[in-house]
Amino acid sequence: MILHDKIDAQLPEWRDRVVKLLKEHGDTVAGEVTIKQIYGGIRGVKALVTDISYVDPNEGIRFRGHTVPEVLKKLPKPDGAEMPYVGGLYYLLMVGDYPTKEQALAVEAEWAKNADVPKHVFDTLRTMPKDTHPMVLFSQAVLALQGTSKFAKQYAEGIGKFDLWKPALDDAVALTGKLGVIAAFIYRLKYKDGVAPKYDPNVDYGANFARMMGIEAKEYEDMARLYFILHSDHESGNVSAHTMHLVGSTLADPFHSFSAAMDGLAGPLHGLANQNCLAFLMDVQKKFNGAPDEDQMRDFCWETLNSGKVIPGYGHAVLRVPDPRYTAQFEFAKAHFPDDELFKVALVMNKVVPPVLKEQGKAKNPWPNVDAISGTLQYHYGITEFDFYTVLFGVGRALGVTANYVWARALGQPIERPKSLTTKMLEDIAAG
Ligand code: HAX
């Protein structure tokens, strides 16, 4: 497999680099931690390492060192498409270099080979109560695949620690190849005909997803590619990425680890935020019977803030500029459906909210984040079931977290075990 060969070729150098750094500078202090950070969600503590992506406060995410506009421009695209192959992005995350079109197609071909989902997975989901949340079904489906794990099998057979990345990679490709089918099945089971979708090996991942979802607009193929690429990775500290890493550090296989990551993504403070943002836009649209003018929007924002609520879709824990993932989606919407009513509300918000938040002076970042618009795009193309949006996020996020999982095994990263203190100990530290 192409990803296997490319990673294998780089590994000796990477391992030497890490061994040298640890040997020569293992005791060098890389950061510090305050009592506020310990009580505050370990926010900002520099305690993780990943080479897959980095969030720069002033630039946003860089995938393997490349910004979102660069990646969207430079990755190869299917003929006639506006957005790149998702398989090309997976190659970039896994290997670290831009793929040629042939290399992106080789990843797409691996996915096509792995897209068959065992019948028992569909059957498991079919037995669940009708009102089961799509994220429960998603996590369950991944866990139901665990019996197919080559990693778990080879671990039980005694594979050496430094070879573990190989079955990890096989599982990563098998899992990501199936996730589009699983997500589309969950959508159809919950909201449509309940028929298990079929993956077409003649078209790419994005086109397959659009078709399996039953969305006729050709543009949605590009929308799907864009959405999965933008949601793929955001460093290691966010809850879904960190959960995958933490559970994987026990040498739980990729299926166990990813299912756990998705349970974290299901939280309202993480993957569910996009649905709050869309609900806010719809409230505005309903209240003003369409898009408000800027004065009306400004008053509505102040009302929201004065009632103690946040303005969804704005602000960020790390970023200090408009999120480039927002900008890419905003530009897509502007180019394809500038007259959409919800997009018009998003447009007015985009003008009005940052100055309002600046004037209020609390938010460290007054700019829009990825969630400010992602629901609007899905809604426009007919995916109106809010509960499903986090599953879409999960399909994208799988690309980044599985790449991290493979590299963590390749570099032999150990089980995670930070140290806890008691409040009394912290009080004693504070007292000097
Ligand atoms: N509206 C109103 N107030 C806001 C705000 C917003 N959009 N963003 C931040 N603030 C407030 C905070 O609530 C906080 O107030 P208090 O001091 O009273 O607690 C203050 O400004 C400082 O917050 P901050 O340091 O700028 O932001 P945080 O790192 O604490 O939080 C959040 C980052 C994204 C959670 C925050 O900006 C927020 O609540 N935004 C709205 C919800 C949202 O868009 N969530 C999606 C996040 C995207 C993401 O990362 N998804 O995974």
Image (cartoon, rainbow, N blue to C red):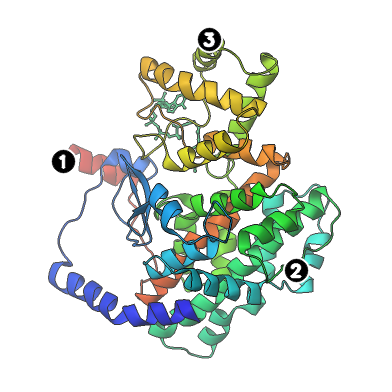
Camera sees residue 80? yes
For residue 319, side relative to residue 155 (left or right): left
Write the residue at 64% across / 77% down: 113
Q: CA distance from mark 3 to mark 1?
A: 49 Å
* Label 2 element class: helix
Q: Earlier in the sequence, mark 2 or mark 3?
A: 2
24 left or right of 405 in image: left
Q: Nearer the viewer, mark 3 or mark 1?
A: 3
From the image, tell me which residue sits under label 1: 432
Q: Nearer the viewer, residue 307 or 168?
A: 168
Secondary element type, mark 3: helix
> As shown in the figure, which amino acid type bears the numbered disc 3?
Asp
Q: Position of residue 256 (x, y in %)?
A: 58, 68
| Residue that badge 2 annotates | 121
Instruction: Give the image location of residue 46, x and y in percent.
Output: 28, 52
Q: What residue is rendered at 50% in x and 55% in y?
A: 232
Q: Locate residue 405: give its quadrant.
A: bottom left
Q: Which residue is mark 3?
A: 299
Looking at the image, is mark 3 or mark 1 earlier in the sequence? 3
On the question of residue 253 being in view, the answer is no
Amino acid beneath label 2: Val
Percent x, y of residue 134: 71, 51
Q: Quadrant of the C terminus?
A: top left
Is the CB of the residue bearing disc 2 within 8 angstroms of ligand 1?
Answer: no
Residue drawn at x 36%, y 38% is 319
The quarter of the image that holds ligand 1 is top left
Local secondary structure at mark 1: loop
Furthest-right residue in this view: 193
Amino acid type at mark 1: Gly
Q: Residue at x 56, y 27 (%)?
A: 346
Mark 1 and mark 3 in contact (Cβ < 8 Å)? no
Q: Could you tell me residue 126's position as x and y percent? A: 83, 60
